[in-house]
Amino acid sequence: MKSSIRIASGQGFWGDLQQAPYEQVMRGQIDYLMMDYLAEVTMSILQKQKMRNPELGYAKDLVEVCEQILPHIVEKGITLITNGGGVNPIAARDKIFEVARGLGITGLKIGVVIGDDILSQVDGFIEQGHAMKHMETGEPIATVKDKLLSANVYTGAWPIVEALKSGAQIIITGRTTDTGLTLAPMIHEFGWTEDDWDKLASGTVAGHINECGAQATGGNFLGDWRSIPNMDDIGFPIIEAFPDGTFIVTKHEGTGGRVTRETVSEQLMYEIGDPSTYITPDCIADFSTIQLEDLGNDRVRVFGIKGRPKTPTLKVSASYLDGYVAFSSLTYCAPDAYEKACAADAVLRKRLDRLGLAFDEIRTEFVGMNACHGPIAPAIVPNEVMMRIGVRGKDKKTIDRFAKEIAPLILTGPPSVTGFSGGRPKATDVVAYFPALLDRNVVDMRVLVDEI
C-alpha cells in the first residue's frame, strides 16, 4: 500500500481550460489525472450527436487533450480517469487508440466502463414494473418515453476500480458520478472495502472538491476574489490522499490561484441539498462532519468525515424533447433607455397577440435593470438597456413566426435601437430534465480492457 497518492483535477466541465490537463501533468508530480466532462444537459447533447453519427457521442475535447498529454502520462506512469466517454465510451477509446498509434505508443491499456446508458432498456424496465417516477413530480417515465433523448444511470467508483485492477492506464466511462472519478483510485490504492463507509465518504468529499476544477483554487470565488493571484495561470486542485481517509487539498507550486479554508469551503457548498445526506452510488456522505485545517502554503487538510451505507437505488438522469424556444434582443440607449425598452416590449407583445400567437411561456428581461436580480434589483438609471425576450411552446411554426417580429421593431418601435446582430432568431429544441430512481440490481455494468 502506498503511503499517499496525488489525484489531480484536469477538467471541471466540458469546455473547461484546454491547457489545464497538460499543466497538471507537467508542472509537478501526480499519480492520477481525473477529468470530469459531464453535466445533465451534456448527456442529451451527446446522445443527439450519436443519433446523427454512431461514431460520435463522446466529449471531443478528450481526444484533443490526449493528443497533447498522452506521451507524458505514459512516460510518467500517470493514470487518466474520465467520464468523457459520454454515451459512446467505446468510440472514445478507439479514437484515443488511434492517437496513440499515431504517436508510436505501444503497450497502452485502456479500460471502458459501459452499462450506464439505459435508453434502449427503458421500455423493458417499465414492463418489469420499474416506474422510474420523476423525483419531484412523481410522474412515471412512461409519460415521456416516446420523447426521450437520453437516459443514463449515475454509476460510482467500483467499475473503475475493476478497470484499475486490470492494469488500465486510461479509463473512460459514461455517466460516472463526478465524485467517483477521484474516489476510485483511493479505493484501489488503499484497499478500502465496500462497507468502509467513513473512508468512502471521505473519498467522496475529495471527489466533490476536485470535480469543478479551479473553483476550489480561487476561481469563481465569492470571498475576497480581488486577492486571488495570477488568475491567468490558475492552478487546478490536487488531492493528496492517505489510507486513513484524510486528505490535503493543494495545487502545483508556482501556479496561480489560492487554496485556503475559504476557497475549499465554498466548493464544498456547491450543489448541496441536505448537507448531512449527500447521496452517491457508493455511499452517503455527511458533509456536516467535515473538518478543515488550513496548513498554509496552499494546503488545506480535510478530515473527520462520516459516512453511511449506500442506497438500494441509483439515480437516472433522463432528458426528453419538450417543445421549442427562441430568444432575441435589442439594445436601447439613453436618454430614457429603460422606458424605450419597456415600450418596445409592450409593442411586440401586442403584435404577437394580434397575430394570435400563443406560447407556453413568454419572458422579457431588461439587461441592466432586472436580468440578474429581477424585482429586487435597485432602481438605477442606466445609460443603455438590452431588452432580451424569449418564448417557449410546443408548436415550432409559432416560435418561428415570433422570430419574424423582432427586426421590424427597429423602424416601427421606439427610437435609439442598437445591438441587433446575428440575424433572425431560430427555434431550438427545449431539452427537459427527468430525474428518477431505479433499483441498482437491474443495472448491468461491464468493464472492457484492451491493449494497443
Image (cartoon, grey):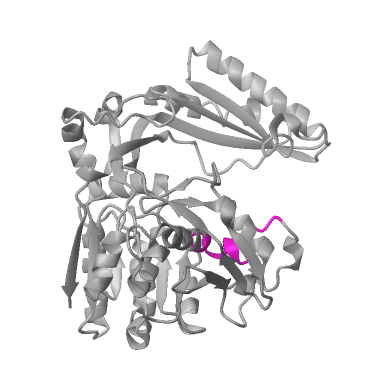
Question: Residue 415 appears in which quarter of the rendering?
Answer: top right
Depth check, front residue: 249 or 449? 249
> Residue 86, image x and y in percent?
31, 55
Depth check, front residue: 205 or 413? 205
Which residue is depicted at the point 30% across and 45% down?
A: 152
| Residue 199 is at least partly visible in this image | yes
Q: Is residue 212 magenta?
A: yes
Question: Residue 223 appears in which quarter of the rendering?
Answer: bottom right
Residue interval drawn in magenta? 209-222
> Residue 317, image x and y in percent?
35, 41
For the image, the number of numbered tags is 0
Question: Residue 170 appears in which quarter of the rendering?
Answer: bottom left
Depth check, front residue: 110 or 261? 261
Say left or right for 269 vs 158. Answer: right
Say left or right for 9 vs 281. Answer: right
Which residue is depicted at the point 25% across and 47% down?
A: 117
> Residue 437, image x and y in percent?
33, 37
Which residue is depicted at the point 61% across and 67% down?
A: 217
